[in-house]
Amino acid sequence: MRQYFLILADAELELVPTRIVGERCVLNSARARNKIPEKMLLDASHHHPAFGKLRDGDRRGRPDLVHMFLLLSLDSDANAEGRLRVFVHTRNDDVVAVKPDTRLPPNYIRFVGLIEQLFDQQVVPSRENALLELRQKVPLATLVEALKPDSVIVIDPAGERTPLEGAIASAEGERVVIIMGGFSKGTFSSDMRKLKTKRVSLGERPLKVWTISSKTLRALEVAESVPELPPKPTKKKPAKPAAKESAAKKSSGARRARKKPEE
């Protein structure tokens, strides 16, 4: 059975950076939630006024994208059938490994609390039952290499315009890694040159993370339903002329043996 590994790469999932922990919007948010500022997830919906002090501030603080990606992936047929493993790789090279039987809270506020707990404890809910596990300082190339893939597909607007299900169906080997971006704008910040990949574009129109997730999961189903080509019929080898000649001689000899001797 073919195994797929779906990676949300360079996702904008991180704790509040030290540079802005003292900003008013961050302090107000921490007070309202009774949290320590530096232990909160950075969230553009609450902390956007301070983003001018951050590099790439126009794309950071999007845990909502990770939430939607995980809900869709974990509820997919591929995951239910045991053919999919899901990973989240962040801009800071943190990697969240998600077990297939994980049931995430559909409520966004509860999801944020769960991920904040993960950053604090490294595993949730416990080490004995680690449904979510956080691994730090793992570049994207290192993660992909650890999965030992036979093929790697990257969904990239700059890639080749081709049907994704066709690219998946024609991928070599039994272990296929599919990488998609976890950001709202821009391109991958990881060095993709270290990866030997096939880049596939889903079109010229910029797509949201949840749209790309849906299209990718649907492409997995379609690719798996493509019937295998029947084996080519084997051609029968013609009988050797020498064998025919030998058989003819035997037959002629038998007819002569059956003739009566002349009187």
Image (cartoon, rainbow, N blue to C red):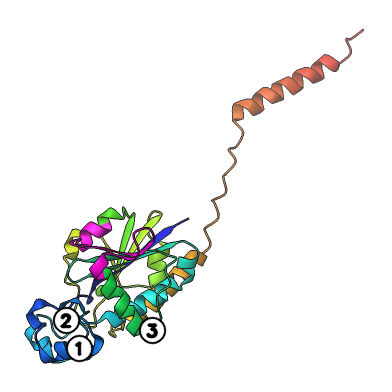
What whole-number distance in Å separates the C-alpha atoms at marks 3 and 2?
22 Å
**Which of marks 2 and 1 precedes in the sequence?**
1
Amino acid type, mark 1: Arg
Q: Nearer the viewer, residue 51 or 256?
A: 51
Task: Give the residue at mark 2.
Answer: 37
Q: Foreground mark, 3 or 2?
A: 2
What whole-number distance in Å separates the C-alpha atoms at marks 1 and 3?
21 Å
Task: Give the residue at mark 1.
Answer: 31
**In the figure, 202 relative to 128: above or below?**
below
Q: Rate crowding at label 3 as few (under 14), some (14 to 19) or many (20 or more) other CA atoms within 10 Å.
A: few
Asked if residue 181 can be seen in this view, the reply is no
Q: Residue furthest front?
A: 34
What whole-number distance in Å separates the C-alpha atoms at marks 1 and 2?
8 Å
Amino acid type, mark 2: Pro
Q: Nearer the viewer, residue 253 or 230?
A: 230
Question: Which numbered disc covers residue 83?
Answer: none
Name which quarter of the figure residue 56 lies in.
bottom left
Q: Residue furthest right?
A: 263
Q: Foreground mark, 1 or 3?
A: 1
Q: Position of residue 165 (x, y in %)?
A: 42, 70
Question: Pointers 1 and 2 in contact (CB under 8 A)?
Answer: no
Question: Which numbered disc covers residue 107?
Answer: 3
**Which of marks 2 and 3 precedes in the sequence?**
2
Q: In the rendered structure, does residue 170 fall within the stretch colored magenta?
A: no
Residues in magenta, as a range: 119-144
**In the figure, 7 relative to 231: above or below?**
below
Question: Pointers 3 and 2 in contact (CB under 8 A)?
Answer: no
Q: Foreground mark, 1 or 2?
A: 1
Q: Is residue 19 left or right of residue 178?
A: left
Amino acid type, mark 3: Asn
